[in-house]
Image (cartoon, coloured by chain):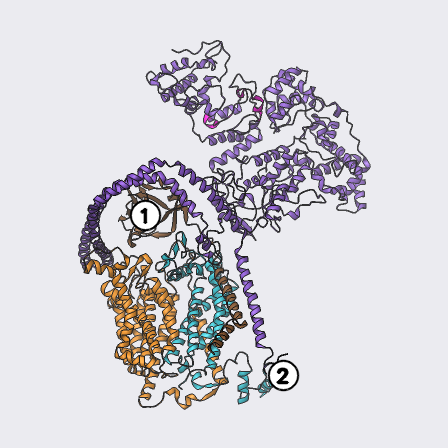
Amino acid sequence: MKKLEPGMAYDTNKLNKVFAFLSILFLMIVVWVFLDDYIRPWKAVQIEAIKIKQEQLKKKFEIAEEDINKEKLESLKKELAQAKKGLNDKRAEINKVEKEIFKLQKFLKEETITSGILNSKVSATNFKYEQAQLHHEPEKAQKYYSMLTDYKKGFAESKDRMKGYQAKEKNLKRKVNDLRSEVIEVQKEINKLTGTRDLVAKALKQTEMGPIFAIRNAPFVDYLDPTLKIEQVVIESITDDRYFQQVPKVDRCMTCHTFIDQPGFEDQANPHKTHPNLDLMVGRDSPHPMKETGCTTCHGGEGHRVNDLGSTAHTPQNEEQRKEWVEKYNYHPPHRVAQPMLKLQHTEASCVKCHQGVEFIPGATVLNEGRQNIEKYGCYGCHKIPEFENKRKPGPSLEKIASKVSKEFFKNWVWDPKSFNPHAMMPRFFEQSNNNSKEHPEYAKKNVAEVNAIAEFIWEKSKPYRPFKKYEGGDIDNGKSLVTSVGCMGCHGVQGAEEMSEKVGSYAGPFLYGTGSKVDPDWLVSWLKKPDHYQEDTIMPSFRLTDKEASDIAAYLLSLKNEKFEKFEFAPLDKELRDEILVTYFSAFDTQAGAKAKLAKMSDRERTLELGYRSVGKYGCYSCHNIDGFEGRGPIGPDLTEEGTKPLTQFGFGIQHDVEHSRDGWITAHLKNPRRWDIGIDKPFKDITRMPNFELTDREAYTMTVAVLGNTSEKVPLAGVKRLDSNEKIVAQGMQVINKYNCVGCHQIDGERGDILAMYEDDINEGPPRLVGEGHRVQFDWFHYFLDNVYPIRPWLTVRMPSFNLTDQERNSIVSMFQHKAKVKTLVDRSEVVNWAPGEREAALQMWDELACATCHSAGFDAETEPSAPNLYFARRRLRPSWIKKWLAGPDKILPGTLMPSFWMDGEPASEVLDGDTDRQLDAMVKLMYEFGTEKLPTKDTKFWSKQ
Amino acid sequence: MAAKGLADKVRETQVWKSIFRHGPPDNARNRAAVVAGNVFLHLHPIKLKKSGVQLGYTWCMGGLTFFIFLALTVSGVLLMFYYRPTAEYAFNDIVALREHVPLGIMREIHRWGAHAMVITTWLHMFRVFMTGSYKPPREFNWGVGVILLVLTLLLSFTGYLLPWDQLAIWAITVGANMAKATPFLGHGGPGASLARIGDFVMVSDKNDVRFQLLAGRFVGEPALLRFYILHCVFIPLVVGTLIAVHFWRVRKDGGISAPL
Amino acid sequence: MSEARQSLNRREFFSYLSVAWIAFGAACAGLASLAFRYSYPNVNFEPQMEFLAGTPDIYEEGVDERYKKGFGVWMVKLEGKLFALSNICTHLGCIPNWQPAELKFKCPCHGSGYYMSGVNFEGPAPRPLERYKIGLNAEGKIIVDKTKVFRQEKGQWDNPNSFITV
Amino acid sequence: MKELINWVADPIRSFPIVCILFYFMMKYYRVVGTKKFLGWSLLFTIPVSIWFAADPNFFTIITLPDNIPIIILIVLVGFLQWFTFYKAALNDNRLDQGLGPIEGLPENREKVWCWPNLVYTELFMIIAGTCFLVVWAILFKAPLEEPANPTWAPNPAKAPWYFLGLQEMLVYFDPWMAGVILPGVVVVGLIAIPYIDTNPKGNGYYTIAERPIAMWGFLFGWLVLWLYLIMVGTFLRGPNWTFYGPFEYWDFHKVVAEYNVNLSEFLWIKWLNTPMPENMFVREFLGIILSLAYMLVLPPLMGMCSYGKKMIEGVGQMRFYIFVVLFLLMMSLPIKMVLRWLFALKYIVALPELELNL
């Protein structure tokens, strides 16, 4: 061991060595810090994007290069050389003029100074003058005034001189330009020829990744002006919730999704793909531009993160994609993220965040379908769902049920609706995975007791009803043809026409299946004749059936039997079990002994009714059906208003391992079999899951999941939501009525729905009229009248417009909806006399003949032919003149496939009259239509309208 | 007599003795002990030149500056309890300080104290120059003092923004625009237009010194936060450190100056 | 002698101590530079002052008002130049109207009038309207940058960034 | 009278006056530094101040809460400056007689106990300081204006008062000079003082006679270029940074006739009567030459004159040139001011292409 200097604990050399070692380690770690900070995954993505762009531009460049007319370019270049040579001859002249311009600069500058000085003097003196005036110093004011006048004069002169110099300069410059004009012109031509290529070349140059690119993006200096950088949009009007604070949304998705808003990259793989729907989303001119709407607003996820696929909360569409991502991007599912991204197929859920108060959201097909399904299955009966509040109960009223079906039918039906009617929308409560008689025989027996008690209770409460008509038999075949032709199928599916029913897919009314085994014949006839006789608030309209028609339809419906079902015998009430269940109810707030004592005080009937009452409450029958004694009770199911943001931990997955552990996974699984969560879990009878099974298809469950996922606690501020303007509000209101009465079951309204039209694929004109711009077509007072007093307009149609039981308010809503939808709200003055121009009437009549209008519109004109077009005598009362004109000018454009010929196709005149002027011809015809209406409607006896 | 007896009794307790390890400072030994044994007083010499305690000589401006610095630290820390440096809240919090927060003059003490500190610092320097006290061996300490003076101005300047009213943002805007004109480093300064290669702008409003100061192109919320941190943490730490150096050097350079 | 000293110097230069100090200094400098870099945020939340204004060929000679609402800019094509004119009156900051019949901008507040070029000629306005920075991007689209203004009275309208030649 | 004062207060007139006053004050500091002078000037100043304050416009300006510190500063500096002269005059008179400074008297050099002498002094100052601050805080509310609004600027937009000297310089210099170079020079110059000033005399006592250059230079910078400009910037600059006299109402519309012309414009248009050359360096060659001469040629010239030679002998080349350069930089401000007022000169070198205007 070396001897140390006195006073030294360590050898200095050793200290130096340790110091050197640690310093080098330190230095290396600093380098690591630099690299760690510098290498970010999104940079690689952006470099990839630049390469893609480069490739694309290279191709574009080649195309542009090819497009250039080489010969022309050569000749132009030669011309240019020629012109430049010519310029040399003029060089002396040009130089002379340019020298003059240069000399002029001195005067210009000098004058600028002079006028500047004078201008400042004018302003300053003006202020002094005004101050003197203000302080009432007339002498001073006078002095300043004269000064001001002088300065102003000088200033004006100076300005004038300036203008003179400027004009001179302009002249001289023009001279130079004239001298050079040849060169300039040729140069312009060349530029025009090569412009596109040069521009592409410039763009191409920008994608170069040369030394400057390297410097700009080098570590440390990349703060100066980097080309690789995090891109973001900040959206003030859409916020994220951060501890009760609403903070503007920040989306940085475009950092990696580089071309998301640029067309031309549709074929690229993600993340470099263009958004697939630029016209509707993201595009600069779309209704949802990226800068205003952002990305996570719709897709969800962590928009402000950029580090990798996982932290940004990307969610794969399916298992396949998940595996792909794991392989490609080392994907790990988002962890500790409140709202992961919606799966691609669920994106439409987000529409409702901003689009509220409307029944249909244009473009959101899955969501609309899901909502339609919610409407169809009446989910809103038991659950509070936004947009479905205050809807009528989805099931029929049970207040007079005793007169409609038998008690035995009722019990069997409640037990298993689908065994009676495979199309039944009433869900199944019993024989489910948590209460079937095989695995849970005791529960099933108790269920039987409950159903018995419910029936007793309902029958006890049922009010008497006496059908006003007696069924006396009818023609079954005619009945069937009536059911399929008058329009029943707009709302009902019909047994015996299953194929057609499926095509139409209507759901507003029950599928008519086995009706004969279900209802009382007298009740049925009465119901068909006058539905509101039995139930005041029914949406079933009257088809104005004759007694014969009603009887025939009833005959057909009664012929539909479900014999197997008829034979079912429902087990009788097990009183012991009934009492046992009741004791469980009573003991909730009491001891067993107390409960039993309470029970003992009740009579047998009382006990049954008590259980019935309790069971109706337990299963929530009242949520879908009107039941006496349950008015005003709240819905039985959980509130779904914020289901889309309900924390995942609050979803009970039970021991269901095959269900995906996500919000949408749970909801879909739940919709498909709500009782699955009880499987393998020991629950007492009173606690087992009660949500019934709707036996949904995958598609239905999927679309409904989308509709439910959209209901979130995220509150988009008013500035961000789609606020309906006064027009749209009225339309939305009207659409609610339209949906309530299922008008869209028959009528296609501006391209939406019209389910029944599926039956008329062969000739769409045989189906209910499509309503396009209906508010423009008809006059609104007529419309009002018509809705209250329906009469046939198209005599050739067998399908009928029924008479609805509309309130004034509803009728108003419908009429104003159409008006506001078409943005035509004016009243047509029908008192006006048709005012013919000279010769116009004759021309109109001539066209009437030439175009043979009476062939189809024969009513009132031609007794020989059956009318195959509306009666024109109604036109004056019904149609707007401006619409008639539009219609005549191009019926095909309004109703594609209409039988009405386009006589004035593409603005061509239909005749030679009125100088062959299309516009005047159309006007004349409109006037003619209006003149028809002033005459009394001819009957078969009166003379036809004459042309005098 | 009784009172004196009581005082003596207190002095004799173990508690007192544990804190003050000497008798009353009425003799040389105790006078030395009271200064040397106290962490707060031990920066002082035990004995000093008479001129050092003469107001006519020192004006006490340095001492006052330090006192105001301490007062500002205390009042500043207290203000921080009620002040949030965000665009939403800053102004409202200032209003709260004057409207309903207890001890409604806290902000006034802080603000006027800040102005007073600028004044006392200037006057301290003025006095030091007048008595030639920067001369050897105190050259280095004068330099430290000049830096402290600049930091004092910066402290005051950074604090000026925090009320987040018109006075604040426009005063800082005027001040920060000077940074814009720094040669080669500010985008409005001489030479800035030369620092570019094609599209690559090396000195622009997005990367110059003003941007660094404001964390933005204009006085906005990031600037507020940045100024808050500078004002409350960064500059005070530097100032505190330099004050320690300054005081230490006063002692080491032979105390308050006096004729040789 | 001198050789020996040189070699000694070299050895000294490569001694552990010098290596240590150099590495230590470099590491500290590196950290300091990181601290400096730290003061420049990678994203900033300031409102966007730039906007794209189509291609130059969509403009006709004269005043175009399509970007007035939304961006506060008139696009003016005049004598072969296209420029972006601020719509803020230089008097008290009202917003003038373009009057195509009179070929002038007229401020409704106090009657200041400006030529199509933006130069004031009547009313109390003290100076011409400001012009914004304008240029073409790689795709041939116009970029207007409102952070940079050009003022005529400062002779800035000749600046090549204040107009596009068309 | 008030109009006269308004007229005089314009920096064009008040700056020379202040300079002249400064000259006489320094020259006759022994007269100034007497109690009699203090008495007479108080007798004059107090009523005049009261008369000033009686004017509503002036009163409005001085009582702005943020302007109170300047008033305090002015009063303190006024007194302390006199006090300095007083002490210096006493010392200088003694020195003339061959006696040492008062501070060097044995009774003043005596060592005293820190406790209680210094500790108590400090305690008193702390108590007094606290009282002063609290009273100030109670009497004057800290200013608070409208909430910050980046879309409209108040007019005038002023920096904090201690920077108003710099802001006032902006009238004469572009921001890179007024806001960056000159303040930088001030800081560097201040730090450099002990290394330039090698005069061993005057260390630890008040004197002017023994260190005239240091005193004249420092006090000119401190009183005239720093404090005077702050006062101008605070009290005499209103909307649009236009000059307003102390008794003038700050009328938003006030316009002052001012149109400034660059040196190059004088040269080419006025004197040579030709258009301006297109090359910017040719255009500005005179200004560039003059500026370079000012900074590069003038120092050696000064070093060659007799006074300069003497100084070089005393302090050495390096110190002399650093001093001269700093001095010239300091003097560039008054020179530019005078040029502006006399010739409406805008820039000596106008290179807006490079943002380099001087």
- Count residues near mark 2 (Cα–Cα under 10 Å), then give few for <14, some for 14-19, many for 20+: few
Residue closer to the observer: D9 or A391: D9
Q: Position of residue D287 (x, y in %)?
A: 26, 63
Q: Colour of chain D?
A: orange
Residue closer to the observer: C14 or A532: C14
Q: Position of residue C113 (x, y in %)?
A: 28, 47
Q: Colour of chain B?
A: cyan
> Can you tell which quarter of the image residue B208 is in?
bottom left
Image-based side of A93 in relation to A285, left or right: left
Q: Quadrant of the N terminus of chain D?
A: bottom left
The residue depicted at 39 percent of the width and 83 percent of the height is D204
Image-based side of A639 in relation to A230, left or right: right
Residue range corresponding to the magenta coloring = A755-779
Q: Position of residue C124 (x, y in %)?
A: 28, 51
Please tell me whether residue C144 belongs to the stretch shown in magenta. Answer: no
- Residue D101 versus residue A773 in the image, above or below: below
Q: CA distance from mark 1 to mark 2?
A: 83 Å
Residue closer to the observer: A400 or B150: B150
Q: Amino acid at mark 2?
A: Thr
Reading the image, the residue beneath label 1 is C109
Q: Position of residue B254 (x, y in %)?
A: 45, 83
> Can you tell which quarter of the image residue B52 is in?
bottom left
What letter labels the chain drawn in brown?
Answer: C
Chain under disc 1: C
Image-based side of A886 in relation to A632, left or right: left
Q: Secondary structure at mark 2?
A: loop
Q: Amino acid at mark 1?
A: Cys
Please tell me whether residue A762 belongs to the stretch shown in magenta. Answer: yes
Kindly tell me whether residue C61 is visible in this rendering.
no
Reading the image, the residue beneath label 2 is B13
- Residue A821 versus residue C76 in the image, above or below: above
Q: Colour of chain A?
A: purple
